[in-house]
Image (tube, rainbow, N blue to C red):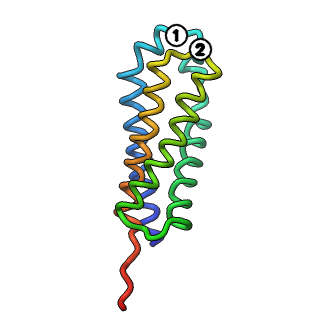
Amino acid sequence: MAKRTLLASFLILVVWILADMLLHNHFLAPLYQQNTSLWRPLNQMNVTLVFAVRLVLLGTFVATYAWLVRPRTLGTGIAFGALTGLALGVAVGLGTYIHSPIPLTMAWAWFFAAIAKSVAAGLIVGVLLRQKPRNA
């Protein structure tokens, strides 16, 4: 189980990094460029903190699924990912829009990206951390 948990965590990290690169560096880049006063310049961003936050989210996601979700199946993994993504999407996308003057398009992009990334993570834990059926 420990090896599968580490593998799931690694795969989720890779998927999240790739998704973030695609979303932020390509799709949302024009919106970021139109609103430069809202963002730190790249050379002022704390890369260590970015990875620390990502690892805490990742660890919380995997640990919650492994310790609290029963039965651990593909379906419950996807459902857990969707619910977690909805919570994160509302908080990150719409919550930021409430407090900061980000474009609504960006808020919705962050909202849907959180859901998509969490569903992908749910699919990964659903496949790799499945409970073995008990013999009756």
Q: Is residue 77 left or right of residue 92?
A: left
In the displayed structure, 25 sits above or below 71; it is above
Mark 1 in CB contact with mark 2 (< 8 angstroms): yes
Instruction: Find the residue positioned furthest to the bottom.
Output: 136
Label 1 vs 2, first from the N-terminus = 1
Q: Relative to 112, does residue 29 appear above or below in the rendering?
A: above
Q: Compare residues 54 and 126 and report the one nearer the observer.
A: 126
- Numbered disc 1: secondary structure: loop
Q: Name the residue located 36 percent from the left edge and 91 percent from the top edge.
A: 136
Q: Residues within 10 Å of mark 2 (few under 14, many from 20)?
A: few
Q: Residue at x 53, y 54 (%)?
A: 61
Could you tell me which secondary element the residue under label 2 belongs to? loop
- Please tell me which residue lies in front, 109 or 39: 109
The furthest residue to the right = 99
Q: Nearer the viewer, residue 84 or 54?
A: 84
Q: Which mark is residue 35?
A: 1
The three-letter amino acid code for the residue at tag 1 is Asn
Q: CA distance from mark 1 to mark 2?
A: 9 Å
Quadrant where the image shows the N terminus: bottom left
Vertical side of 55 occupied by 8: above or below? below
Q: Which residue is mark 2?
A: 101
Q: Amino acid at mark 2?
A: Pro
Mark 1 Cα within 10 Å, few/some/many (few <14, many 20+)? few
